[in-house]
């Protein structure tokens, strides 16, 4: 029996493993995966490169808003996985740096940036059959998504995961710095005026602090099968 195609929105806090679980689910069900966080990171990288943002939270909103029509973001599927493209350049590795992590939440809080990315994300989801993860996918980008999951975990658990991830990539960052960055990003994401981070009323709450990846993947697949029956 052919499943109906749906939109899957996976929202939640930084470093909860949203991207990993969204990628895996997309692979399992044959959907396209879209990393909305990478899109905001690419805009933050552009802003950093052009002196429109810094790592202590200041953003030149007027210049960045004016530059948005010249910022093209797309994804390319390669044998090494999906890569984020900024104006035709592969910036996948650079956008994962601590420097970009420190600039991304203030940049993502700019209303014009959110509007531009929301428009682009909605275009990408027109045909359905996508898994998109981010902060406001189930509340703002696709409020009618058929499957919504909100992922959370303790700040300490998330900081440990992020620290281990950066260490594995030989990126320098101390655990305390990572934890402070996560808490700061949580605060900005939750309190921004434009589409703040919050759980949609109809989203499934997934706290994966103490779950194995296999348990998590099995749960998501079960929810998907229920939603597409």
Image (spheres, rainbow, N blue to C red):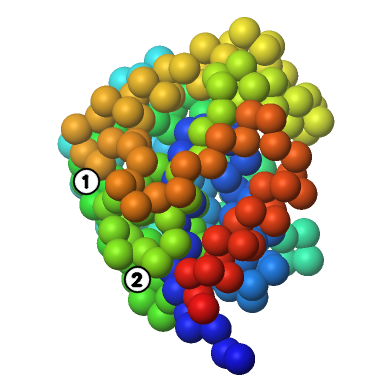
In the picture, measured across the screen, residue 14 lies left or right of residue 17, that is: left
In the picture, measured across the screen, residue 203 lies left or right of residue 21, that is: left
In the picture, measured across the screen, residue 129 lies left or right of residue 168, that is: left
Question: Quadrant of the rendered structure where residue 99 is?
Answer: top right
Tell me whether the residue at label 1 lies in contact with that at label 2, contact meaning CB atoms closer than 8 angstroms: no
Seen at 62% across and 8% down, the residue is 176
Relative to 33, residue 11 above or below: above
Task: Compare marks 1 and 2 and give the one earlier in the sequence.
Answer: 1
Query: Where residue 158 sits in the image (x, y, percent)?
Result: 61, 25
Pair 1/2: label in front = 2
Circle 2 residue? 123
Seen at 56% across and 35% down, the residue is 207
Q: Residues within 10 Å of mark 1 (few under 14, many from 20)?
A: some
Answer yes or no: is residue 49 visible: no
Query: Where residue 183 sits in the image (x, y, percent)?
Result: 47, 17
State the mark number for residue 112.
1
Seen at 41% across and 80% down, the residue is 127
Answer yes or no: is residue 44 visible: yes
Cα distance in 3D space between marks 1 and 2: 17 Å
- Of 144 and 106, nearer the camera is 144
- Of 33 and 174, nearer the camera is 33
Q: Secondary structure at mark 1?
A: helix
Seen at 78% across and 66% down, the residue is 79
């Amino acid at each position: 029996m052919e499943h109906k195609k749906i939109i899957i929105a996976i929202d939640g806090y930084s470093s909860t493993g949203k991207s990993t679980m969204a990628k895996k689910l997309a692979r399992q069900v044959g959907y396209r995966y879209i990393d909305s966080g990478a899109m905001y990171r690419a805009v933050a990288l552009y802003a950093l490169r052009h002196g429109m943002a810094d790592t202590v939270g200041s953003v030149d909103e007027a210049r960045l808003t004016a530059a948005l029509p010249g910022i093209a973001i797309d994804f390319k599927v390669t044998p090494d996985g999906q890569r984020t493209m900024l104006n035709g350049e592969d910036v996948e590795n650079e956008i994962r740096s601590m420097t970009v992590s420190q600039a991304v939440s203030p940049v993502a809080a700019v209303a014009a940036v959110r509007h531009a990315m929301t428009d682009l994300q909605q275009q990408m989801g027109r045909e359905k059959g996508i898994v998109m993860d981010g902060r406001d996918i189930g509340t703002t980008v696709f409020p009618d998504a058929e499957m919504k999951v909100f992922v959370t975990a303790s700040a300490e658990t998330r900081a440990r995961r992020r620290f281990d991830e950066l260490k594995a990539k030989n990126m320098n960052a101390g655990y305390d710095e990572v934890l402070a960055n996560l808490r700061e990003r949580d605060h900005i994401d939750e309190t921004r005026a434009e589409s703040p981070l919050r759980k949609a009323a109809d989203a499934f709450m997934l706290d994966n602090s103490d779950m194995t990846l296999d348990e998590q993947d099995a749960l998501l697949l079960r929810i998907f099968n229920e939603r597409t029956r």
